[in-house]
Amino acid sequence: MKYRLMDLLACPIDKDFPLKLIVFQEEERSIEFKYDNVICELYCGLNAARVKDAGLSAEACNKCMKKEILNGVLICGKCNRWYPIVDEIPQLLPDELRESKEDLSFLTKYAEKIPKNILEEGKPFNLATRGEY
């Protein structure tokens, strides 16, 4: 997932924007980008700031576009839902389409990197309801 997506993604349940991003693993690609302007319009995911406050340049955007988020989590500050990023793909599915076994396995695997409130109270699944926390 590119940091660029943070300018576009909102919580699919309550449409809250921007989501909080926690990166567990990223990698830099050798691809060259040649943007002449700042790419993001509202929110810079790399700097976790509104574009108007981030002091961005086209050069910074070109460097950012080389980065790929391999694994991480997106968190909605409004409804306390979390969405995994697995193998570069953000999984922003509604609750009824999520698999509890997969989500709980993700929480367990990255428990040391995920905020305590998500582990204990995150929606739609958390470790406290499973009795592991």
Image: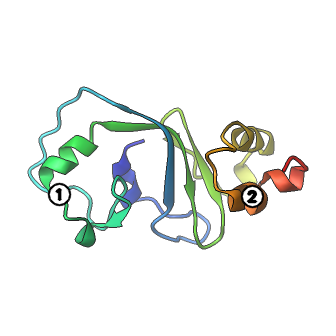
Residue 4 picture location, percent across and down = 33, 51
Query: Which residue occupies 72% across, 48% down?
Result: 98
Is 123 positioned to the left or the right of 68 in the image? Answer: right
**Looking at the rendering, which quadrant does residue 26 occupy?**
top left
Residue 58 picture location, percent across and down = 13, 52
Is 106 positioned to the left or the right of 45 in the image? Answer: right
Q: For the residue marked with disc 1, what is the amino acid?
A: Val
Residue 85 picture location, percent across and down = 55, 43
Is 28 positioned to the left or the right of 79 in the image? Answer: left
The disc placed on residue 38 is 1
Q: How far, Cα to Cα, is label 2 from label 1?
A: 35 Å
Q: Residue furthest right?
A: 131
How many numbered marks, from 0 up?
2
As drawn, 54 above or below 104: below
Is 114 positioned to the left or the right of 42 in the image? Answer: right
Residue 100 picture location, percent across and down = 79, 45
Question: What colour scheme governs how the chains and residues are painted in the rendered image of this protein?
Answer: rainbow
Q: Circle 2 — which element?
A: loop
The disc placed on residue 124 is 2
